[in-house]
Image: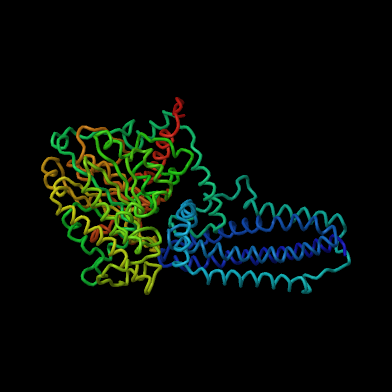
Amino acid sequence: MNYQSRFRQLSLLLLKCFLFSFSILLVSRYLFFTHIQGVLPDQGIDDDIRRAFFVGGRFDAKVTAIAYSPLLLSGLIAAAFQGAYQRWLKFAVGYHAVVAALYVVGCICNHYYYITYGSYVDLFVFGLWEDDSSAVLVNIWQDYPVIRGFLLAFTIGLLAYVTSRWFLHSPLGRINPRPYWHWSVTSLAVVAVFLSTFATARGTLDNHPLKRYHASVSQYKPLNMMTPNVFMALDWAVSDYNEQRTFEPISAGKLTAQMERVLGQPTPVYHTPENEFLQQNPPHVVVVMMEGMGMNIMVEDNPPQNDLLGSLRPHFSEGFLFKRFLAGTSGTIDGIVMTLFHSPVATISHSSVQNTALPGSAVLPYRRAGYEVAFLYGGNGMWRNLANYLPVQGFDRVYDENDIIEAFPEAAQFSGTWGVPDGFLFQYASKVMEEAQKPTLLFIMTVTNHSPYKVPANYQVGPTQISDRFAARAEYEGEKARVLLETFQYAADALGQFMAWIKQSETLSDRTIVAVTGDHRVRSMNTDEPTEFGLTYAVPFMLHVPQRVLEHVPHHYDPMRIGSHRDIFPTLYHFSLSDEDYITLGGENMLARGGVRNMGFNLKRSINEHGAFSNSGSTLYYPWDDGDPLFNKGEPEQKLPFDGHWGEEYLRLQEYYLRSQVLPMTEESEG
């Protein structure tokens, strides 16, 4: 047997392996397409679909060429030696089986990641890794087909192994001991195979290799989501993760120019009016960020058949309620740090700047006004290092599940995957407020309404019903879907009981403001329904202000006003602080007499008075439905009557401002 015979065999074997693994990614993309096909327009996107498959195929070829490059390089060397080459063949067959199995695992993970988070694998995946590991594993085990997935991966891996062994013994794959070509032709063939593999791994023959921006093939997000495979998406996520943990200085000129561009003024400093009543009677402020309280599930509320609010219902009816209101992100820690610290970097609490105090912290105006500032979390305070990080940013106390269980030992027996049930958390919140010796700002983060969903055994469930809409949008079905609705009801009911206690308290009823919002949408719900383009990432913002305070603060309520998490604290400042500076990146008082700009920001998409639009630079927007302004018209419009890059510019402002807080600014001009 000579070198060129071995070279021919290894080349054909690797080609077979390449096509096998490439086909896995192709089939996966086709299945992804069948999943999203229902939310795409019926006409006018045939070219977009073809581009998605074509560019996606290039990504698949790139990844697969890279995956088998180690085999090619080692095989070209081993082919020079009979014994080494035989060992290489055994290794190559096993290597191929492992790659095929990993491809299946990756495709399954990407599919369910999209179903849960509405995106291919992105930066948020590292948030799952950095969460409570045991809780995440329980979540994955209960919510996803882990066993079936691994069985499928094992089966495909075994098929890859068997077909490769068969190929080596087939007429096409067997060695012919006689030379096929002159040695010079063999040399050219080796070079040709090497160069073609390199070009495929690069993704293109022109000056610019295949990159992330090539994945933007359509104005329609689902097609862009299906274009890259999981391995390309994971590579981009790793790059983003590494970049966000490294902070670079920003020039003063560049920051000021971005402030002017987005805010219309050179600084983020604003001021509350002087108010003698608030100065003499500073109210307590309670901010409740409810886990998974998304409008994409709240619209299902339909008593008495489907009661999702329970005892919260009268408080939503009596308070100032804004429904066209976006969560800043799709993650809990992301939403917390963006709301409190204007940070687009979710990992800031355990990053290289975790010990750096941020002058833009939302709680500092309260500290200056003499408030006690506390954080109450239903899980463990060391989650994301919050117990250490929040005191650096102005919090006096951080309470967690340990404090709750110490006060109410029975809470331990009902604890779930992520912490104690919300009912016990709100009991502890009542204790904190009742014992407060000075004006207090209490920020509460609940945990119960998080998958895996589970209703505490001590709760009597009210009626719930799975509607046609919910069945069509949700990944959950049957018993899982029912428990999701019941868990939402339990969390809302626990909040309602807490608010009732506040309003009935002799010492707190006329001096406690309560603000309620959700941290993000309910996940595992379709994010691509055109008529819900603005609803998908929406959360409620409800504000209860005692009548005694309202009588001394000018205000105007318009439930159709639009906002997002950035507006929560500016609204609260105006009802609790007198003559006080505060920092916000464009957040407004939602009850201002003079109106608001009606802008809502989420990392994925934004909303304004015209409709909802993606922050990815798309030229499409979805106008509001005239009949129900919570929803959008099904057909998007091409001509934007506003700046479609506003969301991108706002995110850039957040990034610039965070860099200016954690590092000294340079004096370079904008250019």
Q: Residue at x 44, y 26 (%)?
A: 669
Colouring style: rainbow
The one of 602 and 611 positioned closer to us in this rendering: 602
Q: Is residue 87 visible?
A: yes
Q: Position of residue 397 (x, y in %)?
A: 32, 43
Q: Position of residue 635 (x, y in %)?
A: 35, 60
Q: Position of residue 404 (x, y in %)?
A: 32, 54
Image quadrant where residue 626 sits: bottom left
The one of 263 and 239 positioned closer to us in this rendering: 239
Q: Position of residue 564 (x, y in %)?
A: 30, 48
Furthest toward the top, the residue is 667
The quadrant of the picture occupied by the N terminus is bottom right
Left or right of 356 on screen, residue 468 = left
The one of 3 and 550 positioned closer to us in this rendering: 550
Q: Residue at x 37, y 60 (%)?
A: 450
Q: Is residue 619 visible?
A: no
- Asked if 580 appears above or below 11 in the picture, the reply is above
Image quadrant where residue 166 sits: bottom right
The one of 560 and 187 positioned closer to us in this rendering: 560
Left or right of 380 on screen, residue 437 = left
Left or right of 586 on screen, residue 122 = right
Count every numbered label the image shows and give the total.
0
Left or right of 634 on screen, residue 508 = left
